Amino acid sequence: MTSKIQIHHEADVMVITVNNPPINAGSTEVRKGLLDAIHLFQDDANLAAAIIIGGGSTFIAGSDIKEFSQPLAEPHLPSVIAAIEDCPKVVICALHGAALGGGFELALGCDARIALEGTVVGLPEVTLGIIPGAGGTQRLPRLIGIEKSIEFICGGVRIKAVEALKLGIIDKLVTEDLLANAVIYARSLIGKKSRIRDIAAPHAEADVILAASQKALKVGKQRPNVHQAIKMITNVMTMSIDQGLATEREVFQTLRVGTEAKALRHQFFAERKLFKALGNKESKPKDLKRIAIIGAGTMGSGIAIACLSAGYSVLMLDQNETALQNGVKKISDFYDARVAGGKMAADNLTTLLNRFTSSSEWSDIASADLVIEAVFEDMQVKHAVFEQIDTHANPQALLASNTSYLDIDAIAAKTKNPSRVFGLHFFSPAQVMKLIEIVRCKASDPSVIEAALQFTKRLGKTPVISANAFGFIGNRIYNAYRRQCEFMLEEGAYPEQIDQALEGYGFAMGPFAVADMSGLDIAWAMRKSLAATRNPDHRYVSIPDALCLAGRFGRKTGSGYYLYPQGAKSGVVDPVVKGVIDEASAAKGITRRSFTAQEIVQRVLLAMMNEIAHLVSEKVVGDVTDCDVALVNGYGFPRWCGGPVFIAREMGMEKLRSEMDALAKWSGPGFVKAELSGLFETHGSE
């Protein structure tokens, strides 16, 4: 027996408890302990039934993902499940918390499953670039059929206990005393061995399988492991259980050591470390209950929705009465649509709206624990707003600015106590986008940043912490990315080629489609504000300026990099833009050349890597992998590619330096090569 497994006897029932906090991950030690316990149980003539249960707050909530990067040590999970199935006596699982991945596969290998109300089960392996590897694709279809199995396995769906009971995944549901009920239930099954493997293989019509597969592949972004999961599930109809299990394991092992799975594990660990405490034990973070949001525009109303949905009391303030009413309507319309769509109960909406107030009076923010400014991106406007906030807010309240570029130290300087000020950069639409940049000012108290982390966690967001620097983390990298794409426009590529290449790689949208959507005038205003300080010797692409001077600001004006005819869902190629680009190249004496999609992608990735290395050396970012998190969660970078930091590490320093030298030549004057070693720094998170 291992320290991760404890056993005790309830008369003729053996209770096997998994004790591997915090989530009882299915590690090598856990698997070995379970196998030993099953052998002890089988050999003891005084025992008639066994229960596997989780210690602490959960059953086995997944495998130990750190093990996936190495050769898996024996015993493997299929061996543990085979021992349970081969045991002549009944073994049941008692589930609470979460039974996910290998934990759920273990449960499916038992003779029955009893669960505590509130339990969730599921097979989320596809989110890590793999498939279930211990029978999930073979046993679940025998319980619930092909169609539902494709939906749940390929979508990584977490199934609530009530639904699992209806589907027959769980055999019994209890509201209290899980262990006591499990002992009674186990005794009722003595002598009634019941293995899922013995259930007849299900059948599904070809059109049903096709429809379910197409839906799953759309949700799963057509990734190879989703294709494989569908194949394994449908194999159930034609393969014996042993053939199916062997084939599933082989595919699982191949995918597990592949680059895509490695990239997704990199992203998993990078995100998991974000909420680790900052080590400030002396000052406890403020408990936030009431949030005041200044500004009722698109961003302000989106932040209000995010806060309301997380259970906070929210005040939205705007001194423009029309803007305030429009903001209130946006919030009301959002929740009305959720009720109409069956995503929210009407009673819950009433309760939620009772926590929401709107006002145009500054004095009303006095009761807020956190005040978030979300007004126009202009320093003078921000200064004026913060002077009012400083006058009317509770002296103990935390103060945050939602800005994407501006100097937050300069904003904090307008307050009497800058230690309570920090940046909270939401991404639009704020109620949808996962990323939040928490910006640490020079004077920000560590407990304030800790409170910001807890706030973002409650919102269900993904935070990265940035020092105060122009563009922070995400926009700084994105600017380097966009600039490189503009260089390629001058050299021979066209907007649609670049967008198609990057979307083909996996980006949600190409940079020029994004620019048209957000508005070319926004970046133009920023460039004009920086024009006086720009080095005239540095390479500067005038194509975006030329489009703006022609009144082409993107979708809102019907033309930008693309043309947007009335009613068109996406932009169409415009010969006028090609003319503008060709003229710009000719004016600089550049002989245009053709680009491959691979070259376009490589230059973009290198530009990102170089900028990330600058962020590390300038100490803008604390952990380099935070940059990958920011790009995946806020900028549409394909999760299954891991991020520029992951890709740089896969390339290795020698190749990276060589390719960066080439990028420097392509980019010309103004491109500064960073110290690349920062890309390889690790902080023990993987």
Image: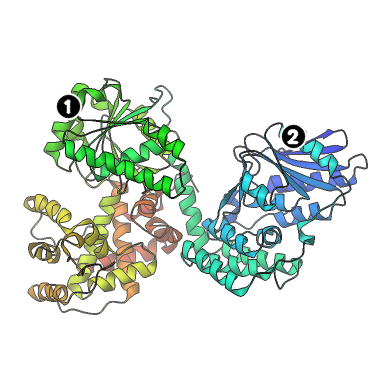
Tell me the quadrant of the picture where the N terminus can be found. top right
Question: Disc 2 marks which amino acid?
Answer: Leu
Residue for badge 2:
179
Mark 1, secondary structure of its residue: helix
Q: Is residue 17 left or right of residue 584?
A: right
Q: Decide: is 567 above or below 96.
A: below
Q: Which residue occupies the foreground of this view, 603 or 117?
A: 117
Picture quadrant of residue 208: bottom right
Local crowd at mark 2 within 10 Å, few (<14), some, or many (≥20)?
Answer: some
Percent from the top left, x then y, of residue 177?
71, 31
**Residue 416 seen in this snapshot:** no
Q: Decide: is 440 above or below 163.
A: above
**Residue 405 seen in this snapshot:** yes
Residue for badge 1:
388
Local crowd at mark 1 within 10 Å, few (<14), some, or many (≥20)?
Answer: some
Q: How is the image coloured?
A: rainbow
Q: Is residue 589 left or right of residue 597?
A: left
Residue farthest top in this picture: 395
Mark 2, secondary structure of its residue: helix
Q: Residue at the spot x=77%, y=48% of the render?
A: 35
Percent from the top left, x then y, of residue 630?
36, 50
Residue farthest right in this picture: 45
